[in-house]
Amino acid sequence: MDPEFNVQKYGELLAQALPVVIDNLEDHERLLTAAEALMDKGEDLSSEERKLLELLVVLVEIFEHEEEEADDQPQPLPHETIKRLMDGRGWGPDTLNDIFGNPKLTADALSGTKAISKGQAKALGKLFQVPPKLFFSE
């Protein structure tokens, strides 16, 4: 480590920047802005600021890489998601009859021939304890 590195000063910089593992766009924007502000200082960065910048860049790059990978993956269709969630729990189609109304409508939803309504998506989200958006086609 750099002999001029001041742990206390670095701690103060960390307390100001509040770096976290980025899992949302708000944190991404906040940490990206902090990194850009440090980059704007150019060669005038202290050892502590340089270390903070390295940390912020790593966090931003990890988030952006994960976002790119997620964008490259095709999202499963809603009926495929339902089937996976049911299989994982060992449930049969009858479990969903209350949500879809009757066995015929349940079968149609599970085959993908019937679209899932907003209300049904909310009920499925509650049942499986996942975000309802998993059951919407894009």
Image (cartoon, helix red, strand yellow):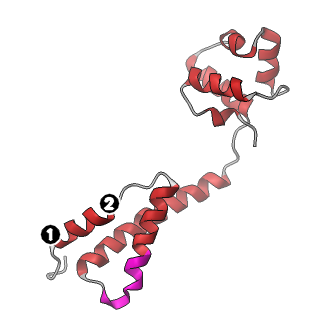
Q: Nearer the viewer, residue 58 or 20?
A: 20
CB-based contact (under 8 Å), mark 2 and mark 1: no
> Residue at the location (65% across, 35% down)?
134
Determine crowd level at label 2: few under 14, some 14-19, many 20+ residues with C-alpha closer than 10 A.
few
Give the amino acid type for the residue marked by disc 1 in the picture: Gln
SS class of the residue under badge 1?
helix
Position of 70 relative to 11 (above/below): above
Which quadrant of the view contains residue 27?
bottom left
Asked whether the viewer can see residue 93, the reply is: no
Residue 22 percent across, percent down from the top left: 44, 55
N-term-proximal mark, 2 vs 1: 1
Give the amino acid type for the residue marked by disc 2 in the picture: Leu
| Residue interval drawn in magenta | 36-44
> Residue at the location (41% across, 81% down)?
39
Residue 61 percent across, percent down from the top left: 48, 65
Task: Tell me the CA gap for discs 2 and 1.
Answer: 15 Å
Residue 41 percent across, percent down from the top left: 37, 86
Asked whether the viewer can see residue 43, the reply is: yes
Q: Quadrant of the C terminus?
A: top right
Left or right, 51 with respect to 1, comes to: right
Q: Work out which residue is located at the far bottom of the displayed protein and give it.
A: 43
> Residue at the location (21% across, 70% down)?
10
> Residue at the location (57% across, 23% down)?
126
Res 18 label: 2
- Residue at label 1? 8
Res 105 label: none
Residue 114 percent across, percent down from the top left: 83, 25
Left or right, 129 with respect to 104, comes to: left
Position of 13 relative to 131 (above/below): below
